[in-house]
Image (cartoon, rainbow, N blue to C red):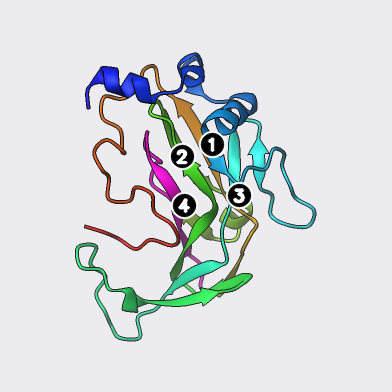
């Protein structure tokens, strides 16, 4: 796909935004016109839960109630080229307990559609970080869409709780100076359109 084709894929309203970190009003505009985040919560929700929704310069996403908890009962070797699903036990629950020094995979409640001139960086919520829980997500690339698979590591020697349908990570949206020549969609990336918790693919 050449540059001209990429420009055609990029919404006009996104082209008119200045490069840099997007503010709440710009994120809202991309959501309203491009369907960038679905479902979308226009203001921070807390009310006795870990906050989620639109923030000043980002969006706090929720984790779903679908979890894959790492276990090594079969003494398996973790191999990203030949990954075995037997390394996980599946749980659908409102509260996931991650064993000490282990991790779990879950997914975002939200489905993301990233424009061709936007890159998204994810950071874990401070509430979980202060409890020794680290959220790891690679950048959401221009043109990618899907549920975000979230890896949550419990770095403590104690079991740790993660609450479904509450905030788990903040996403920061960066507008590029120009659309990329090759987007994730145009190169048919292997995680394009993923739904649910997605394991490693080669």
The span from disc 4 to disc 3 (Cα, nearest Å) is 22 Å
First in sequence: mark 1 vs mark 3: 1
Q: Secondary structure at mark 2?
A: strand
Q: Residue at x 26, y 59 (%)?
A: 201
Q: What residue is pinned by disc 4?
A: 147
First in sequence: mark 1 vs mark 4: 1
Q: Could you say which disc has been placed on residue 113 in the image?
A: 2
**Side (left or right) of 82 relative to 72:** left
Q: Secondary structure at mark 3?
A: helix
Q: Secondary structure at mark 4?
A: strand
Query: Answer yes or no: do the residues labelled 4 and 2 have beta carbons within 8 Å?
Result: no
Query: Answer yes or no: do the residues labelled 1 and 4 have beta carbons within 8 Å?
Result: no
Q: Where's the N terminus, which quadrant?
A: top left
Q: Could you say which disc has been placed on residue 126 in the image?
A: 3
Mark 2 or mark 3, whichever is nearer to me: 2
Residue 109 in percent (x, y) is at: 56, 55
Could you say which quadrant of the image residue 121 lies in?
top left
Q: What residue is pinned by disc 1?
A: 35
The span from disc 1 to disc 4 (Cα, nearest Å) is 13 Å
First in sequence: mark 4 vs mark 2: 2
Residue 91 in percent (x, y) is at: 51, 76
Query: Answer yes or no: do the residues labelled 2 and 1 have beta carbons within 8 Å?
Result: yes
Q: Where's the C terminus, which quadrant?
A: bottom left
- Label 1 crowd (10 A; few <14 / some 14-19 / many >=20): some
Query: Height in image: 193 above or below 132?
Result: above
First in sequence: mark 2 vs mark 1: 1
The span from disc 4 to disc 2 (Cα, nearest Å) is 9 Å
- Label 4 crowd (10 A; few <14 / some 14-19 / many >=20): many
- Label 3 crowd (10 A; few <14 / some 14-19 / many >=20): some
Specify the segment rendered in magenta. Answer: 136-157
> Does 20 lie within the magenta span?
no
């Amino acid at each position: 796909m050449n540059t001209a084709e990429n420009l055609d894929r990029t919404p006009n309203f996104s082209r008119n935004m200045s490069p840099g970190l997007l503010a709440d009003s710009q994120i809202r505009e991309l959501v309203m016109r491009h369907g960038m985040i679905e479902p979308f919560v226009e203001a921070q929700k807390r009310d006795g839960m870990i906050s989620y929704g639109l923030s000043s310069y980002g969006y706090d996403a929720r984790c779903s109630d679908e979890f894959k908890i790492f276990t090594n009962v079969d003494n398996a070797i973790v191999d990203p080229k030949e990954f075995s699903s037997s390394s996980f036990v599946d749980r659908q629950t409102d509260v996931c307990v991650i064993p000490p020094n282990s991790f779990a995979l879950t997914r975002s409640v939200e489905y993301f559609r990233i424009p061709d001139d936007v890159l998204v960086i994810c950071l874990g919520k401070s509430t979980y970080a202060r409890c020794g829980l680290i959220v790891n997500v690679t950048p959401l690339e221009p043109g990618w869409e899907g549920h975000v698979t979230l890896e949550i590591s419990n770095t403590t020697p104690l079991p740790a709780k993660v609450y479904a349908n509450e905030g788990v990570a903040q996403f920061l949206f960066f507008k590029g100076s120009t659309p990329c020549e090759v987007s994730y969609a145009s190169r048919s990336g292997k995680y394009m359109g993923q739904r649910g918790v997605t394991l490693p693919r080669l």
